[in-house]
Every structure is written in C-alpha cells, then in structure tokens.
Image (cartoon, helix red, strand yellow):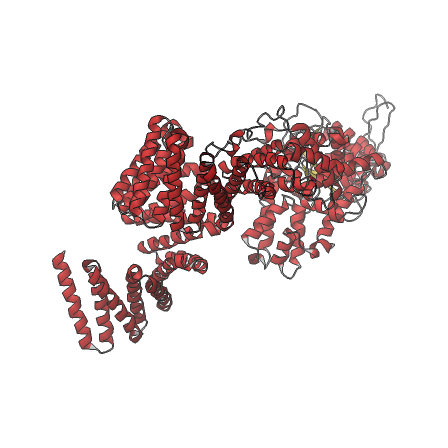
Amino acid sequence: MPNASNINMHHPHFQTAERISNTYNIQTETQVNEALRLLGNPRGCAWDPARACLDGTRVVHIEAITSWATSLGAEPTTSGARILLVPGPAGSGKSALAHTICKELSRSGHLVCSVFFDHTGPQPTAEDFTVVLVQGLCTVDDPVKKAIAELIIQNKTLASAPASRQIEDLVLPIVANLPSTRTFVVGIDALDEQPNPSMLKLLRDYIPRLPSTFRFVLTTRPDPLVMQYLENRPHIISFPHPLVGEFSKADVKTFIITRLSMTDYQTTISPELLRTFTAKSEGLFLWAETVLNHIDNTYDQAGELADILAGASSYWTETETAAGKLEKLYEHILSKLQWKDPRFVKKYTVIMGALVTLREPLSRRGLAALYSPDGITENDIHGICMLIRPLLKDYSKDDPAHPIHLLHLSVQEYLAQRAPQPFRIDCEVHHKSLSRLCLLAIQRELTPAKVPILGYSDGDWVWDVTEEDCEIPVLLRASLTEPLWYSMQHFNAHWQSLREEAGKEHTTLLHEIVVENPRPILEAAASTRSKVDMISLQHKVWPHGPPSFALARRMGKIYVSLGRCLYRANRYAEALPLFQGTVGLYTPYKDEKLDTTVELEFAASLTWLGLCLYHLDRPDDALPHVKKAVTICRQLSLTHGNKARVALAHSLETKGHVLDQLERYDEAYDIDMEVLDLYRQLVVRHPEKFQHRLGVALWNLAWSLDACKKHEEAVVVIQEEVELCRKMMECGTQTNGEDLARSLQRQAMYLNNAERTPEAVECSREAVKIHRRLVRDDPEKFNAGLADSLHNLASDLDNCGRVADAISLSCEAIKIRRQLVANDPSTFEPGLASSLHNHALYTQKAGRITEAVGYGQDAVEIRRRLVHDDPEKFNADLAHSSHNLASDLDDCGRVAQAIPFSCEAIEIRRQLVANDPPTFEPDLADSFHNHALYTQKAGRITEAVGYGQDAVEIWRRLVHDDPEKFNADLAESLHNLASDLDNCGRVAEAIPFSCEAIEIRRQLVANVHCTFEPDLAHSLHNHAIYLQGLGRIEEGLECRRERDNIRSRHTAQS
C-alpha cells in the first residue's frame, strides 16, 4: 500500500518480488516457542563433563584452543568465520579434549553449540548440526530468537530442510542481528565418523560466509576424506600441538598415576613398573586407559601389567575389552580403505609392511631411497601415509625428511600377529625384502667416494706391536645417507630374523660385501657403532670347510686391524669376535710347516685375543690363548731371535696381566722380570722405538712387586720408570707430560704403601703441577686428569695428618668433577662419588660434622644410581658411603636418621660376604659393631645385643686367621656387648665377654704399651661395675685398683 499512513494491522504479512522483506508482529512467546519446536531435538549434541580431560592434563592444548576461540583479533587470511582443525590419530584423546573445550567455553559464555559424531546412539547428521547451531543462536538474545522464529513461521519447511539450506535461509539472514563484541564458538568432535560428505561440504563452502566472530573447533582423525575437504583451505587453521608422542607423555603419566591412586592395588605397582608402563604408552591415552580398565578386573594386577608390558599376557590379547577393543578400532579405520583397488593393495602391502617391519622409523624420503630398487617412490609412500594417517603418529605431509612413526606398538602387533586379511602383514616376507635392500644400499653407497673416511685401518702396521693403534673416526648420522645409516644399523637384525635360508640374490650380495671386500663394512660399523656379526655372516656364504690359506691371511689382517682399533677405543666386547675370528682362520693351518711370518701372525692373534679377554675380566679364558702364543714365540726366538723377541715380549707381557688378574702375583712377578729383561735388550738397539715399551714393563713390574707386598722394591722400580719418562720428555719422545704425571701418581701410591707418606705427597704435588700446566693449554682434554691428581694429593695429605690442607684440594677436585659429570655422567659420576665420600671424611676429621653429612648424602645418592645400573661393580662403594654417613649422622646427634643408612650398609655387606667372605667380613663386622651402638643410643637395647653378638662372632673368626690384625676390633666389640647385656639386666652374661675383652687388651698393652692402656682401663672400670652388681665386691675393688694404677701411670707419662 504505497503512501499509506496511520494504518493499524494485526498479524500482517507483506511479500514483494525480487528482494524479500519480511515483517512479522508476533505478539506471544508461545508462538515463538511453537515455531522453534518444529526444529526438533537432535541427540549427540551435548558435552559431557564425565568425558572431559583430567585436571592438570592437556594444559597447553586447552589454553591455546580457548585463547584462539575467544579472541576477536582478525586473521589476515580471511574475513569470514574460521575453523581450528585439531587432527589426531586413533586413541589420542581428541574427544576428551573436545568435551573439555566445550565445557570451558560454555562456562565463559562463548559456546553456541556442540556436536559429537561418536555418539553411541543414532549418529548425528549434518541437519542435526545446523539445527543445534540455530538453537544455540536462539540463546544469544530475544531479538535473534524472534528473528529465527519469524523465518520458520514464514516457511515451515526450513525446520526440516537440508543443512545447506538451513544455513542459507535460517542462519545467514540473522547474523546481522548478532553482537560484534564476542565470539560464537561451535565445537565439533569425531567428524571422521560422519560418513555423509554433506557435513564436510558445509564446513568447506558455507562456514566461510559467516562473520569472523564465529569460531569452529573441530577434532577428527586425519581421515583421508576429511583431510581432502578441509586441509589447505584459507579459512581453516591446523592446530600446531600434536596429541601424541613426547608432547603427551607427561599428560599420560599424570592420567595413569591419578587412575592408580583410585585403586586398592596402587601400592603393588612398583616405581620401575610404573616407569615402564608410562614409556610403553608412548603418549597414547586410549592404550593406557584400556590397560588400566583391563587390569582392574584381574586377579594379580601388578603381575598382569608386567606381562602386558613384556608382551607375555594371553589374557590381554584374547579379551574383547582389552587388546580386542583397540584392534576393533584399528580394523574399523582400515576397513574404510579401497581394498578392491589392486594398485592400492599392492602399495599398501609394501609400504605398510615396511613401516611394521622397520627397526627404527625412516622418513618418506629415506624409505623411498631404500626401496628405490623395487620401484617405490616418495609419492607412493606419501599416498599410502595420507590414507593411513589415523594409524600414524604426527605424519607430516609437508616435510619429506620427517620420520614416519606408527601410532603405537599395539598397531604393529595387531598388523603382524592378529589382523585379518587383507590388513595382515607377513613380517618374514618384509625382513627378507629389507635384508636385500639393505645389502643393496651398502653396496651402492658404502664407497670411498661417498664415505671418505674409509680405509683408515689399512696398512702394514697391523702386525707390529710397537705401532700405535689407529683411532676410529666417528661417522655421525648426518654424514651418511638415511638408507646407508639404517642399513648399517639394522641389516644384521633383519638377516637374523629370517627363518628360512636366503636366496641366491641375497647370498651373492652378501659374499661381495663380507668376503670379497669386508673392510668398508667393518670400518663403517666401527665408526657408527653398528652391530654387524661379520664372522657369522661370512660362514653363511663360505663354501663348506675352511677358506683358502691366502684368503684366511687376508681376512685375518683385516680382522686384527679393526680389532686393534676397537681395542684402542676400549671397545673390547666388539673387538673380541674379530680376534676370535682371526684365531679361527689360522687354527686349521697351525700344524702345517708355516713361514715364520705366518707363525708370528698367529701368535699375535692369540696374544690380542688373550689381551681382549683380560680386559673383559675373563682371565681363565685368556690364559690358554696367551700360553700358546708364548710357546710359539719362545720356539721362534731360538732360531729367529731378533724377529721373534718383540712378539715374545708382547705375549709374555699379556700373560703377566692375566696372571695378575688371577691373583697369581708371584708368577706374574717372574713373567714381568723376563719382559723387562727383553725390553732392556731391545732398547739398546732401538731406543726410540722401545723406550715406551720399556717404561710399560717397569710399570707392570712395580705393580707386581707391590701386589706381592714388596713395597720398597716397587718404589725403586717405579722410580726408574719416572726417570725414564723425564728422559723421554727431554728428548721430545713425550711431549706434554701426561705420562709423567700418571707415573708420579703411581709412585705416590707405592710410597704410601711403603709408609713413606711425606715423599708420596711430593710426588702427588708434582703430578698436580703438571696437570695444572696441561689444563691451561687444553682444559677439555686434561681437566679429568687434574681432578684425579687433586683427589690423590688430598688423600696423601690426609694420610700425613694434614687434613686442613687436604680439604681445599678436595674441594677443587669436586668442583671439576661436577663440571665433568654435567657433560658426561656415566663416565665421571663414579669419580665424583669417590671425591664426595673422601671429602666427607676430611670434614668430619676437621670437626665440621654438618658439612660431612651433606657430602656423605651426595655420595650415597650418586652411588645408589650407579648400583642401579651395575650393582656388582658399585655395591661395595655404596655400603662404604652408607656406613660412613650413618656414623656422621650419629656424631651430629641424629641417631634415628643414622639407623636406616646403617641398615642399608649391613644389607649390602651381607650380600657381598655371601660371595667373597675374606674380603668383606671385616666390613660387615664393623657395620654390626656400629649398628649396635646406634640401636643402643636409640633405646633399642635388645636389638643392640643381637648386632653386637653378630659382630663378635665374625671378629672371632677373623682373629683365628690373623690375631695381630683383628684383636683390637674383637676387644672393642666384646667390651660394647658386655655393656649392652648389662643394660638389659643380663649382667651375669656380660661377665665372660668383659673378661675376654680385658684379656685381649692386656695382650695388646704388652705389645704396644701406651696405645691400648686407656682401653684396658675402661674395660676394668666396667668390669668392676658388673662384679659389684653381682655382689662380688672384692673382685670389683681389685679391678678398680688396677684401673687407677693404669690411669695414674698414663697421666704421668702424658
């Protein structure tokens, strides 16, 4: 009605062509609600607080997402609504994150709606999503609500229209009515479970038309269809924080600990088991949750968990709600792929087979290079990985050098062991392929042109014992191609996994690499620390029977050259099979009439084998080989003196080492004397060549003399060695003085043993002076040596009674060793523990007991760590530190804290005594004695008596074998035991022990008059009290008179 005015109309409806302008005047709330009720009530659209993340987990993810969702800052890439895509593989906790985000945004008033496509009932549809979006917008304010209702009343078909039309005709027309001062957030979870692409089209095509105040948070598996629609769209942002792997391990650990805290079996799960469980979870929430749900219902939860982690639980693998639950999920994901497409199936079999069978992940670039002989390209690998992304961990479509990880070990186990066809992977087939491809990669890429360090072990130096062993150059991963690195590290494992004999192609390749030219692979293996079982591999491709004599010699030379290189690097376990292989190569020909040169090669091989076994603490195995070498060399020295003398000296020197390790010191001494004589002869003709070996011979002889308790003679010999070092320095044969410093430290040790302590201090002081000079020039190289010499000098000063001087040097040693430990704990922690232990002793002697406790605690803490990794090596040290710490705590008046450390020392020393009584029984008796004192002070007198009796029992045995050494200790324990029995009211039992203590102390006073008189007086004093307690007054008075006489005499003398 153009130009109309002052017209009143009830419920008018005007419609004009071209542009539609609707105006309604709805007067009742009922009409609005009736209109909106037509939309229905979709299910699966409500967030659930019970499914949210555990407090304290996913903190970074939640903060990043909520901050993005509530920020009004404009994105430069688009002017419309934006989607945050949060992809994550199966079981990574996406739904828990989605429920948490929705909960947080609902509380802050930003959430418009949510939809969860993993709903257990009827699955939500795209139309359910748009309906719940419309319903959410109705809650913004009444004008928006009424505007939507008006649109529905105008056209009721909109209430049930397709999703795209509802966006077009219900949502877009009202967005102008929405406030611009806040964001409108929509949460969508498990989009990959929505089979209809209409939802994907909606998100791709219609959402960008909404205003920039709209934020969509979308969690999904990286399903191929989902990613095809949504990746690389201008309005879609990929969430940068991964949901699995290292990033999630701390969260999974928190989840596991919290879940266990709610059970009644939490105390049965040891810290070690918990650590293993957390590590095995690999940051995958679903796996950890499924394991916990499973063990909740088992008889022995800790035992079942241990079996699951070890892969030994059939109950776990056969239970539908355990491994079966995970495997149904994996099967569901795989079932969506194109199994009727033969090209896909072929590439899946190869590429998934590789991912399942590889010993460590490769990038798609590296995998393509390894598989290039089989025609596999990067595009092939990328195509398959994009399809199986839900089963991969953080696959990068943009970085071809990023390693490809399967989601979890359970995926590998499922595909290799229990998956049905066509998903199943036959690992035997793929081990065979990978062993062949690794050989091809080694053949193709392990050449001097591509790896320039090759050839470092070659040369005629191999059989000359006076030549220095070659240093092994380090080959880092970055310096080799990915296929070559992988092949060097893992070829051996793939080959050993084959259950059937390899085919001709494999054996031909293997023969070329390990028989025709084995030096490159051996050198590369040494430089990359790869494990290549060369001897075993060669036997697989050699014809039956031993190799030809010429081949045996050629191979033996290569083996010894690499063995000596590994020996120089202290890698004895790796050198051992090479020396064993060399001996095995020569042995078939040992009875033939051999050339002198060949016989000397055989003898050298035997010597090196013996030396290697010696360093591996296998002297019994070493001795027969060394004896054979000595026999050969002695025989040859009769006819070829000059040529055989060096080999004889070397074999005898090794025999001396072995005998010394067997504690056959007298025999070792005889051998070392002969070796010294040989090198004295050799040095006359070739001083520069043999001076160093002469010094080694002197060093070894001094050691043997000291071991034979001939300390003064050891000092004389080591003095000659020190002078030889000085002479070589003057001549320039030794350049930096490190050997001289080491010799001076050894000289100090022998001087100490000879009770020439002041001279020992001077030697140690000179060693420190040399090391200080060396450190000024190269601190990184010589700091460890300086710390050693400072440590030793402090000990020598303490032995001289100069503890105040010792403390400053000990502090300096500790400071250096702390720095060294920061860079290399495994190498330097034992030395640091030793310095801390000694420093506690020095500070205790200086009366600084509180400091002593602190250093003692540090020593115990380190030694506990060391014992965890190698109990056999470090248990005695830990017991020593725990024993001393208990004593220091007692001196501080903290006896209650001392007792646990004393118990620890006793427990360890009991174990040590079980294996080696002569060595450790004195220490155990000492610990029993001290523990009796601590328990007595703590008022636990009955316990004190028991420990005192244990101490006395051991001391009696020790006194039987060596009374002079242990009588004083026995007397002290007897004295204390008598006192404890008296305190228990068992005075009659105390008397015999007190009498025995007095008798021993009388003998000690007779031998060393003044030293033991105070102890004897103390025993007499106590004995008088015991006698009087029994009414034996006269006897008690007699003891008192003797006591008084001793004290008077002692006072007069002092």
Give the quadrant of the N terminus.
top right
Q: Residue lying farthest right?
A: 17
| Of the pair 526 and 182, the residue shown nearer to us | 526
| Of the pair 390 and 736, the residue shown nearer to us | 736
Please state the horizontal and vertical placement of residue 603, each as a whole percent of the image. 52, 40
Residue 958, visible in the rendered structure: yes
Q: How many marks overall?
A: 0
Residue pictured at 65% horizontal, 25% vertical: 74
| Rendering quarter of residue 909 | bottom left
Please state the horizontal and vertical placement of residue 306, each as a whole percent of the image. 62, 54
936 to 831, vertically: above or below: below
| Of the pair 723 and 58, the residue shown nearer to us | 723
Residue 824, visible in the rendered structure: no
- Tell me if 899 is positioned left or right of 119 in this view: left
862 to 548, vertically: above or below: below
Q: Residue lying farthest bottom?
A: 1031
Residue pictured at 31% horizontal, 33% vertical: 769
Please state the horizontal and vertical placement of residue 159, each as a whole percent of the image. 83, 38
| Of the pair 432 and 49, the residue shown nearer to us | 432
| Rendering quarter of residue 232 | top right
Give the quadrant of the C terminus.
bottom left
Q: Residue lying farthest left?
A: 1052
- Tell me if 331 is positioned left or right of 404 in this view: right
Please state the horizontal and vertical placement of residue 233, each as a whole percent of the image. 73, 27
Q: Residue lying farthest front?
A: 639
